[in-house]
Amino acid sequence: MELIDKKISGSKLAEIANERFGDLVKAVVGGELHADEEAMLLERGSKQENLWGINIYVDKPTSERTKFDSMINIRPRQNNRSRDVLDEAIRGRIVAIVNNLVEA
């Protein structure tokens, strides 16, 4: 599990993907599983309601690489009853964070 809090190259991200899942990196906006990443970030002071699980597909174009699919995203209290992230504003912020941290 790695905390990415500064820019990472696409090639380094691909290395991380190859170590575990091949074509994707599981991340919580940043592990092996979303729940592990979530726990690490909670221990570091993050608030659960601000953590969302994603998959980053390293071989996809920037516009298609972030997919929202994680059990930690199911949050009825936040009107998110899906593994997806339903709020477009939150999705936009997540994509912006990923694009800011992952160099093409």
Image: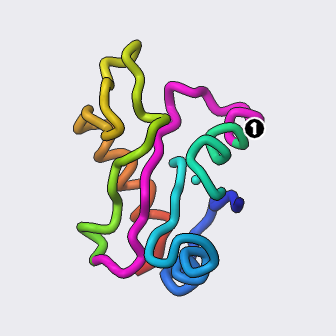
Which quarter of the figure is the C terminus placed in? bottom left
Q: Where is residue 42 in the image (x, y as percent from the top left)?
A: 69, 33
Q: Where is residue 51 in the image (x, y as percent from the top left)?
A: 52, 36
Residue toward you, 101 or 12 = 12
Q: Name the residue under label 1.
A: 44
SS category of the residue bearing label 1: loop
Magenta stretch: give its range. Answer: 41-60
Q: Position of residue 46 (x, y in %)?
A: 64, 33
User: Image height check: is 44 above or below 16?
Assistant: above
Residue ranking furthest to the top: 77
Q: Quick check: is 11 in the magenta stretch? A: no
Which quarter of the figure is the N terminus placed in? bottom right
The amino acid beneath tag 1 is Arg
Residue placed at 37% from the left, 55% from the top? 96
Residue placed at 31% from the left, 40% from the top? 84
User: Image height check: is 17 above or below 42?
Assistant: below
User: Image height check: is 54 above or below 80?
Assistant: below
Q: In this view, does 82 lie to the left or right of 50?
A: left
Q: Where is residue 16 in the image (x, y as percent from the top left)?
A: 61, 75
Q: Is residue 69 left or right of residue 36?
A: left
**Which image quadrant for residue 93?**
top left
**Which image quadrant for residue 6?**
bottom right
Residue ranking furthest to the bottom: 11
Q: How many labels does the image show?
A: 1
Residue toward you, 4 or 22 = 22
Residue ranking furthest to the right: 43
Residue placed at 52% from the left, 58% from the top? 26
Residue placed at 53% from the left, 86% from the top? 11
Q: Residues within 10 Å of mark 1 (few under 14, many from 20)?
A: few
Q: In this view, does 85 lie to the left or right of 41?
A: left
